[in-house]
Image: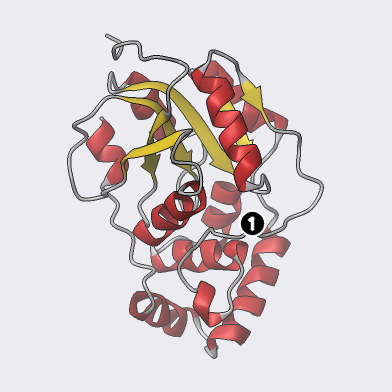
Amino acid sequence: MTSPERDPGGPVRLALVDDYEVVLRGVAQMLSEFPDRVEIAEIDAHEPVSVDVDIALYDTFAQPEVDRDGIDALVANPHARHVVVYTWAFSAELIETAMAKGAHGYLSKTLSSVELVDALVAIHQGEIVVSPDPTRIRSVPGRDWPGRSEGLNERESEVIALITQGHSNNDIATLMYLSASSIKMYIRSSYRKMGVSSRTQAVLWGLRHGFGADLRQIDRWR
């Protein structure tokens, strides 16, 4: 079963998918400059999926990457015509997996708001869009994430989110497609900014600062 076809010339109706509401709100804020091109139809992490959308935009912040089963739930859901991955992780294996599972786009978080909207519109009009592999990590104005106001960059924040969820360093390296040494580097820099010195302190800090994930979004799409 597929959702009804909509006018490809109208605004793209989006569902934003991630367990962290602050992340979703940041993406929505970034896209709010383009109301004639993009309409946010689904964002509430606590409500069942109830509307048809042109694109489910899967933000991978502190989520399983596309080689897990989360992407399958989105692709199989009849409310979403297209599924697009929005991520930092650009290994060839992940891109191939996403496309094989039925995603219609694989977009970098280094895209500007204009570039992101252009890509979403192109996908809505029938194109398959894969961003170029980003050459460096940079923050895009408008996005938000837990710990941003405390000085954590998005990658540091994602590591702390996964620690708060109870994952080991090896789990986090696997989930983020990074080396164990990179994870240790992010942990050291994060702890310094947070003013903590142990994993237990980091978890408690995370829970106090909005790192407790809802963990219901993908289940709502099943």
Q: Position of residue 135 (x, y in %)?
A: 82, 47
Q: Residue furthest right?
A: 135
Residue 58: quadrant of the picture: top left
Residue at point 65% right, 69% down? 186
**Above or below, 222 relative to 180:** above
Q: Position of residue 202 (x, y in %)?
A: 46, 80
Residue at point 34% right, 75% down? 207
- Whether residue 119 appears in this view of the structure is yes
**Above or below, 203 relative to 220:** below
- Whether residue 108 appears in this view of the structure is no
The C terminus lies in quadrant: top left
Q: Where is residue 24 in the image (x, y as percent from the top left)?
A: 40, 52
Instruction: Work out whether residue 55 or residue 186 is closer to the camera in this orientation and state it.
Output: 55
Instruction: Work out whether residue 178 or residue 15 is closer to the camera in this orientation and state it.
Output: 15
Instruction: Work out whether residue 158 or residue 21 is closer to the camera in this orientation and state it.
Output: 21
**Above or below, 143 relative to 221:** below
Secondary element under disc 1, as helix, strand or loop, is loop
Residue at point 26% right, 47% down? 216
Q: Where is residue 189 in the image (x, y as percent from the top left)?
A: 66, 78
Dot 1 corresponds to which residue? Answer: 140
Amino acid type, residue under disc 1 in the picture: Val
Instruction: Work out whether residue 204 or residue 112 is closer to the camera in this orientation and state it.
Output: 112
The N terminus lies in quadrant: top left
